[in-house]
Image: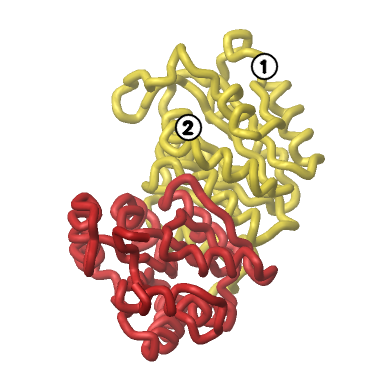
Amino acid sequence: MAIAEQQTEGTSDRSWHGIVLQTLKRNAVSLIPYVPDRVLTPLIKNLHADPFFTTFATAREEEAVGIVSGAWMGGRRGAVLMQTSGFATLANVLASLAVPYQIPLIMFVSERGTLGEFNYGQSLVCRTMRPVLDSLALEHHTITRLDELEFIADRSIKQAVTTQAPVALILNPLLTGGKVFDK
Amino acid sequence: MSARNTKIMNRFDVTSRLIAKLQHEEAVIGGIGNTNFDLWAAGHRPQNFYMLGSMGLAFPIGLGVALAQPDRRVFALEGDGSLLMQLGALSTIAALKPKNLTMIVMDNGIYQITGAQPTPAANVADIVAIAVGSGLTNSAWAADEEDFERLVDDAMATSEPNLIAVRIDDKPGVGTTRRDPVQIRERFMHGLGVREPL
């Protein structure tokens, strides 16, 4: 709990969310539709506060994927923020839009369902995520360490754009503190 | 205007009327199935994007293009069955208020391409009422072809999102889009001036 608080609170650039925000900005990723998640709250709040970004909620994750796909074809980069359960709604849009049209879809997934999950449904849906990613041979990384975050996020965004392929960056509770029962 | 007082039109005819009006390299997103088949049949343009899946995402994709290129007018064409899959997108668009996005709903009350089964909304829901209730106040049924053309002209002159609903018959699409997603996407990006051809 104490470690989690230290890692999720505050606006320091060296917090996980500060690094994500700066890495998005450095890579000119400015359109950020999201379906919220408790762990993502400080990132979402700081993205809203920064006029560089156009940050807004969507009703469903696949809607957000459609928006950033259209934006990319129009010359603007975006990224989608979501929770594990939201990723589970994306198999169709990944297989019928992002992958076949070669769209560099950048996804940040806050990982629920592991390392202290208290909701059985969350832990089950989490187990579907990597098999879906692997079944489409999609690049994905599970980020557990603060000192690796910038490297993985920066390189993965650049790789997505240059190879025109989607990437999922899974933000593990070891990085973010996750969500625990008493929060 | 209620849907019940509108003329039943034809998707290909209405789509052709829209395309004939486009003089400024406007982007057009064609939703899955007959909607993009008729867009294709109306004559390919470099600024057309054809969806081969991702049912329900024509308006979100159109929104993305509109946000990326605020000086280009964007039209997104969607079937009623597709729209029912993603009604939340109407509120997202209403909240963002893109000044350059016009949504056109082709409403035949059926899933024509799968065997003409009625949608759950057929005979009970009103697409325009849903759109207005979702925050898209500039939404209207087209009474007939002339009214559709007038609504398109109005949409091109306004600086807020518009939705035009058209009651259409049960005819299938006239053409069949060539199913080459990479070419479709690449040519669309050329058409939008994002990239040069190799």
Residue furthest toward the right?
B157
How packed mark 1 is, by other alpha carbons closer than 10 Å (few <14, some 14-19, many 20 or more), is many
How many numbered callouts? 2
**Disc with the residue nearer the chain's start (1 vs 2):** 2
> Looking at the colours in the rendered structure, which chain would you say is drawn in yellow?
B
Residue B145: image location, x then y, percent = 67, 21
- Vertical order, A121 against B88 (above or below): below
Residue count near mark 2 (Cα–Cα under 10 Å), binned few <14, some 14–19, many ≥20: many
Looking at the rendered structure, the secondary structure element under dot 1 is loop
Is residue B24 left or right of A165 when viewed as pictured?
A: right
Residue placed at 56% from the left, 26% from the top?
Answer: B130
Residue B197 in the image, given as x and y percentages of width and height: 55, 73
Q: Which chain is red?
A: A
- Does dot 2 land on a helix, a strand or a loop? strand
Q: Amino acid at mark 2?
A: Gly
Q: Is residue B141 above or below residue A40?
A: above
Residue matched to label 2: B79
Give the camera-side residue of A160 and A145.
A145
Where does label 1 land, which residue?
Answer: B143
* Residue at the image point whose x is 51% and y is 36% from the top: B78
The amino acid at mark 1 is Ala
Seen in the picture, residue A31 relative to B126 is either above or below; the reply is below
